[in-house]
Amino acid sequence: MKLHAVLAALALASGLTAAAAAAPPPDLALSAADRAALSAAFERAGRTPPGPEASDAQVWEATERLAQAELGLRLRPADLDPLWAQAPAARSPQREMASAYASGGLAAWAANLSPEAEVYAALARARLRYAAIVDSGGWPDLPSDLRLRLGRAGPGVLALRQRLAAEDAGPPRPDQPEVFDRPLKQSLVAWQARNGLQADGVLGPATLARLNVPAATRLAQVEANLERWRWLPRTLPADRLEIDTGGAEGALYREGRRVRTFR
């Protein structure tokens, strides 16, 4: 399903979902254990949990909106792409939450909101990281004519160091930060490899264009891919073929174990 369609629908759904929470139970009194379990559910989803100053009612309403998102219920995949065959099961977060609270099982219910796949967990952690970057102002664009390789020197090298450090730890700051040294090349090679680029440690047009993608766009891409994961079955077939269309890679699974990868 095309990224722009998912992003546009998510932008609309986020506004609609904010007003969709039902009133909390009239006898609501969350225990410390309940609040801790709900906070953990937010963190697993890559979201910042309500703070300790939030009332029980505010925590309840925020959790209900979280459940709507984590269960993949904000969008109907077929409305975006009739060829998309996967869709989440129909569920009612409001009824589920109320039932779990009444039976003392709110913590167990919250623990199973998000998909368990490690790929999803990694995306959720990335979402938290990119959200923090966006909140801090993102990263500045590098000059469009900047070209760098090992041994070059100048203010552009320092700008590249700062750009890599904004997204990752980056290489240690050397005595001569304006010199393109080997640690900086290794850091750029690692970044290129993660982003599906030729990992040559040279700042050329393709790498520059990818580095200049705004942090907000990166966050939106992570959000869209999290949404796609929510539409998949919670338990994937043990024998399956997974294709990463963006990275042009495939993986064959047998009995739940990856036995082969290929381009």
Image (cartoon, rainbow, N blue to C red):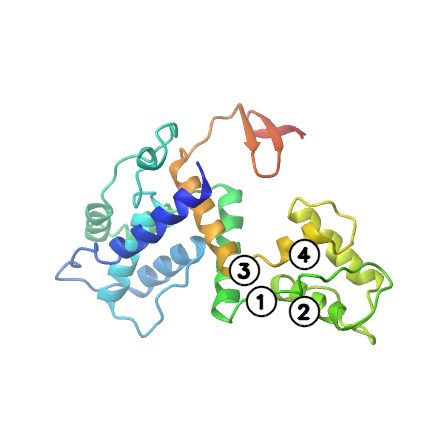
Q: Which mark is residue 162?
A: 2
Distance CA(mark 4)–CA(mark 3): 12 Å
Q: Tag 3 or tag 4, which sits nearer the N-term?
A: 4
Q: Is residue 115 above or below residue 24?
A: above
Q: Residue at x 62, y 53 (%)?
A: 210
**Element assignment for label 1:** loop
Q: Please name the residue that numbered disc 3 is placed on.
A: 214
What kind of residue is marked 1? Answer: Trp
Q: Tag 3 or tag 2, which sits nearer the N-term?
A: 2
Q: Residues within 10 Å of mark 3 (few under 14, many from 20)?
A: some
Q: Is residue 222 above or below residue 253?
A: below
Front residue of 83/122: it is 83
Hey, which quadrant is residue 227 in on the image?
top left
Q: Is residue 87 left or right of residue 242?
A: left
Q: Which mark is residue 204?
A: none
What kind of residue is marked 3? Answer: Pro
Residue 196 at x, y = what percent? Answer: 66, 44
Distance CA(mark 4)–CA(mark 2): 14 Å
Q: Please name the residue that numbered disc 4 is placed on.
A: 208
